[in-house]
Image (tube, helix red, strand yellow):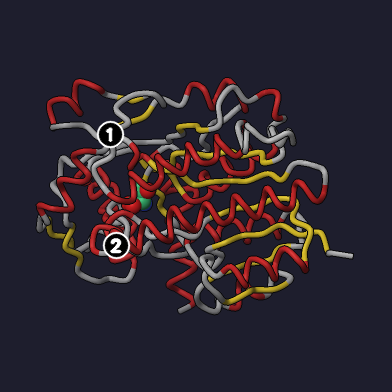
């Protein structure tokens, strides 16, 4: 008999870490992780097994399919926006071909089990593309159907994978005699920038905010690569995990769409710096603009509208900007660096 498990790809990544922390704390012990690299001890101690490999490796996926019965997939493996701009073809292969393979695994599992497999997909505000700063300011908080004109490979990948997930959930092989509708229960969140107290981001364009506070906490100099007025939505990692668990726990009949915006706060880089200085008076931060990375941030919305998430599955961020610092970032970051 195959063991019933929950599969997390990219388990050693930022959100993967946060998911393992939260699901394990909730008593879930049948977590199987997949990552290119051996996860750290924190993840290893909280998962049933960690498979080292590439999600593009069909042999690995076949082995998982043969050995396990998958209740849900949290597909976190991806190349983020900045890294994807340096390797767009590899980004497409990982972000799109990898997601297609995981969706196919979910369908294969659901068909053999005769019941749905839940599939969480982390989309991004990168699916939006504003033509210039004037349009960005005029548009304000975007809803899910606004300005879906991505200007990065990562944003293109995420937008297409949203459609792939919708296809697998509602239209898979629609000319076949076999009705597979609803077997893959695809659910996605368009994440804003995420700030983790426990891990540092790798290869994102929104990384300037988490990099700034971690540099200040370590007493290191930091060159912020965007202007002081650069503004996009952010949230804490703990709220990001709360949202994933909230969406995945929602009854299917409550969901009116497969993709949801969520948000918590949207400080400019300069406003975030002022907040950092409240706690780290000696923070040594300069603004040294990288015009190319800035142009990506300028194409992303200054905020998003998350009414649908609030109405369909009760989404509500816990941390506004002040609470993000006082209740999460400062206590957790201080304990992280005081122990190291
Ligand atoms: C990135 O910066 O690429 C990601 C994102 C906003 O999706 N953190």
Residue 334 percent across, percent down from the top left: 44, 65
Q: Is residue 238 above or below residue 336?
A: above
Q: Is residue 68 above or below residue 234?
A: below
Provide the secondary structure element on which disc 1 rests: loop
Q: Is residue 42 above or below residue 170?
A: below
Residue under label 2: 83
Other residues around mark 2 within 10 Å, as few (<14) / some (14–19) / many (≥20) = some
Provide the secondary structure element on which disc 2 rests: helix
Nearer to the camera, 191 or 9: 9
Q: CA distance from mark 1 to mark 2?
A: 20 Å
In which quarter of the view is residue 4 placed?
bottom right
* Residue that appears at 53% across and 39% down: 188
Nearer to the camera, 328 or 15: 15
Residue under label 1: 149
Disc 2 CB within 8 Å of nearest ligand 1 atom = no
Disc 1 CB within 8 Å of nearest ligand 1 atom = no
Residue 9 percent across, percent down from the top left: 57, 61
Q: Disc 1 or 2, which lies upstream in sequence?
A: 2
* Residue that appears at 43% across and 37% down: 320
């Amino acid at each position: 008999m195959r063991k019933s498990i929950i599969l997390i790809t990219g388990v050693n990544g930022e959100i993967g870490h946060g998911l393992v922390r939260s699901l394990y704390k909730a008593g879930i012990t049948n977590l199987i992780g997949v990552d290119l690299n051996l996860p750290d001890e924190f993840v290893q101690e909280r998962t049933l097994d960690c498979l080292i490999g590439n999600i593009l490796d069909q042999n690995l996926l076949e082995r998982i399919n043969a050995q396990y019965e998958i209740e849900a997939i949290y597909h976190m493996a991806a190349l983020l926006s900045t890294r994807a701009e340096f390797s767009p073809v590899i980004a497409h292969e990982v972000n799109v071909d990898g997601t297609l393979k995981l969706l196919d695994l979910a369908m294969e599992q659901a068909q053999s089990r005769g019941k749905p497999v839940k599939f969480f997909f982390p989309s991004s505000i990168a699916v939006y593309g504003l033509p210039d700063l004037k349009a960005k300011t005029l548009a304000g908080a975007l809803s899910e159907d606004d300005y879906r004109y991505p200007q990065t490979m990562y944003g293109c990948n995420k937008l297409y994978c949203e459609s792939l997930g919708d296809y697998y959930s509602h239209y898979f092989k629609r000319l076949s005699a076999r009705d597979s509708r609803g077997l893959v229960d695809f659910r996605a969140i368009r994440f804003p920038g995420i700030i983790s107290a426990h891990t540092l981001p790798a290869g994102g364009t929104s990384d300037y905010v988490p990099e700034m506070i971690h540099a200040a906490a370590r007493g290191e100099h930091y060159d912020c690569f965007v202007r002081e007025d650069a503004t996009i939505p952010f949230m804490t990692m703990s709220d990001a995990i709360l949202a994933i668990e909230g969406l995945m726990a929602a009854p299917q009949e409550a969901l009116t769409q497969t993709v949801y915006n969520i948000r918590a706060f949207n400080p400019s880089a300069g406003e975030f710096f002022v907040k950092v200085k409240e706690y780290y008076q000696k923070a040594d931060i300069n603004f040294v603009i990288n015009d190319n990375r800035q142009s990506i941030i300028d194409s992303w919305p200054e905020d998003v509208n998350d009414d649908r998430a609030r109405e369909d599955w009760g989404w509500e961020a816990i941390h506004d900007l002040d609470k993000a610092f006082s209740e999460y970032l400062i206590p957790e970051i201080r304990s992280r660096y005081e122990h190291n």
